[in-house]
Amino acid sequence: MTGTSPLESFGARLRRAMDDRGPLCVGIDPHASLLAEWGLNDDVAGLERFSRTVVEAMADRVAVLKPQSAFFERFGSRGVAVLEKAVVEARAAGALVVMDAKRGDIGSTMAAYAESFLRKDAPLFSDALTVSPYLGYGSLKPAVELARENGAGLFVLALTSNPEGGEVQHAVRADGRNVGATMLAHLAAENAGEEPLGSFGAVVGATLGDLSSYDLAINGPLLAPGIGAQGATPADLPRVFGAAVRNVVPNVSRGVLRHGPDVGALRSAADRFAEEIRAAVTPV
C-alpha cells in the first residue's frame, strides 16, 4: 500500500485499504495506565516496547493505525524518536498511519505543523493528520495544500464524541447552520469530484446517536472514535452514519490494546472487531 506512486491520493489509498483489509483503525495510545496493565514501566523503554508490539501485531492486517502523539511527546525527544520509528515501521508493513495530533493554528505556524507531518521527507510523515479548525476553517489552508502536494490527507474535528465539544460544534451561525455542519460542508467542497474517495475527512463520534440532521455525504472518510471503551459498538454504525457508513473508519483503541502485551491476543481482538464492523457495514 505504501509502495505506490507518491501522486496517488490518500483517499484512493484509504479506499483500497478499507476494501482489502476492512475499515478498522486501531489506536496506538500508550498512556501510563495501559503501560502498567501490560507490566511495563512508564518510561521510554516501556513506550518503545508498547509501540513496537502494537505495530508488530497490527500493521500487516488493519487498514489504519492511529498513534496519539501526546503520549509520545510527554517523554521529550526520545519519545518522539520512538514515534518516528513506529510510523516508519507501520507504513512499511502496509498500514496507513493517521497521526492524531489535532494541530491547529494560523499562517506560518500552521504551515510548520503541516510540514512536520505531511511533507514527504519529514521524519514524522504520516498518511493523514488530525487537525482542529476552530481558528476558522481557512486557517487550515497550509495543511490542505501540503496534503494535496504529498498525497496525504486530513481529518478535521467536526462532531466529536466528548461532551464539551457541543458548546462549539453545535453553536449556530448567522446563516442558521451550526459549526459542525459548516465544517462538513467545507470538506464536501474539498472532496468534490474526487474518485474513488476524497482525502479530506471529518472526525465524527460513533457515540453521538442519530446524525440524520447532518449531511455526512462529504465524499471523504469519517473517522469515528468511540467504539469499545467509550460505549459504541460496531452494530451502532449504520444507525449513526446512515448511507455514509461505507466511508466510516471506526477507531478502536482500548478495546483492542487491553489484550496486550500478547501479540496473538491483540490480533485476535482486532480480528473480532474487524469482523463485527465488516458485518455491520456490509449491505445485506
Image: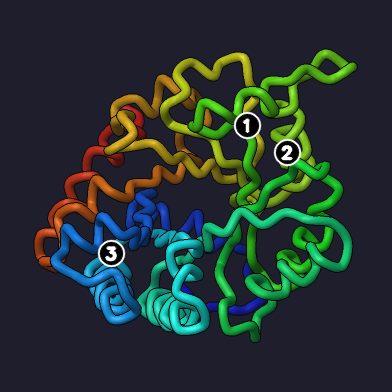
Q: Which residue is mark 3?
A: 61
**CB atoms of marks 1 and 3 within 8 Å:** no
Q: Is residue 214 above or below residue 184?
A: above
Q: Which mark is residue 174?
A: none
Residue at (58%, 62%) from the top-left corner? 128
Residue closer to the observer: 77 or 54: 77
Q: Residues within 10 Å of mark 1 (few under 14, many from 20)?
A: some
Q: Quadrant of the C terminus?
A: top left
Quarter of image, res 47 = bottom left
Q: Is residue 102 above or below residue 162?
A: below
**CB atoms of marks 1 and 2 within 8 Å:** yes
Residue 247 shows in this picture: yes
Q: Which residue is mark 1?
A: 217
Residue 203 drawn at (x, y percent):
56, 41
Residue 277 drawn at (x, y percent):
29, 39
Residue closer to the observer: 39 or 198: 39
Q: Residues within 10 Å of mark 2 (few under 14, many from 20)?
A: many
Residue 68 is left or right of residue 114, and the answer is left
Look at label 3 and name its amino acid: Arg
Q: Which mark is residue 188?
A: 2
Residue 38 is left or right of residue 173, and the answer is left
